[in-house]
Amino acid sequence: MRSSVAQFPSRVWRSVVDFITPPRCLVCRVPVGEPASLCAGCWPQLKQIDEPVCEVSGTPFAYDQGKGAVSAAALANPPPWQRARAAVAFDETSRILVHGLKYHDTQETGLLMCRMMARAGRILLSEADLLIPVPLHRLRLWQRRFNQSSYLAQHLAERQGKPWRTDILTRVKATRPQVGLDNAARRKNLKGAFRVATQGEPFIAGRKILLIDDVLTTGATSSACAQALKQAGAAQVDVLVFALVLQPARLHI
């Protein structure tokens, strides 16, 4: 009873807000019944990634290859992280959501992304000791005033009751934008870009770190971050993103 009474003011406020500004689909903007959601037409257009997937890269398999199966690509070029998971494939529909949070600070979009990431990364989240977002360089953060990865990490951590930190992994090199670069160019661009602050090393030593980002394209950014974290003593680094680019050579965000 106390819980219902405590929630009553928030329900009333939500009703008032919905009456003044009715919730709309985050993709096509038609009215919907719940905030931070998609309409019945847009929801099926999201290509959700479900099991079976590659244990390392998170890319979907056409059929079940057994527990812990690893794709040929991940075997040929193993990344420095242990496991990666994504909620959806990156395409025209998920691009709208990613850009809504990344460039327009649409926080309702971030809430939907977090819900879907929590489902896709439930095992990684349950096993993680600490969540760390992919950082922006201070100049980029000053220009944008918003780091979408930090937003996602914060809400995922609060949802799961996990600690999260933004002051451990830093971006010390102001790199050029990754858009339009191939995998080799991306990795060269990010060489030496990330560093673990000396005062942050005790917080990651021997621990399982979950790296949070919005999109995984070639894996160059996540690799550079994972390398910095492992060199500083992290026992394991996993990666959780909202969208995974399945054909990075063809599609740029």
Image (cartoon, grey):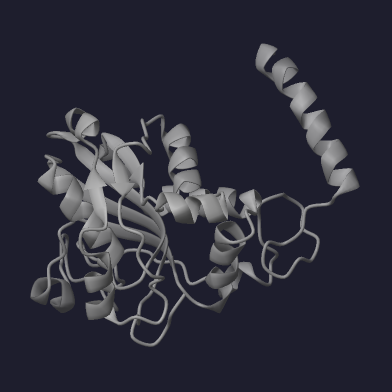
Is 182 placed above or below 29 here? below
Quarter placement of the N terminus: top right
Answer left or right for 59 relative to 91.
Answer: left
Residue found at x 69% / y 67%: 40
Single out the residue that lies furthest toward the right.
20
> 143 or 238, which is in the foreground?
143
Q: Is residue 154 visible?
A: yes
Answer left or right for 8 relative to 166.
Answer: right
Residue 143 is drawn in which quadrant? bottom right
Answer left or right for 143 relative to 10.
Answer: left
Is 231 placed above or below 38 here? above
Could you tell me residue 212's position as x and y percent? 37, 50
Answer left or right for 86 relative to 228.
Answer: right
Residue found at x 34% / y 80%: 181
Residue 16 is drawn in which quadrant? top right
Q: Is residue 124 visible?
A: no
Could you tell me residue 100's position as x and y percent? 61, 62
Residue 74 is drawn in which quadrant? bottom left
Could you tell me residue 73's position as x and y percent? 17, 77
Could you tell me residue 89's position as x and y percent? 43, 71
Count of picture labels: 0
Residue found at x 38% / y 70%: 176
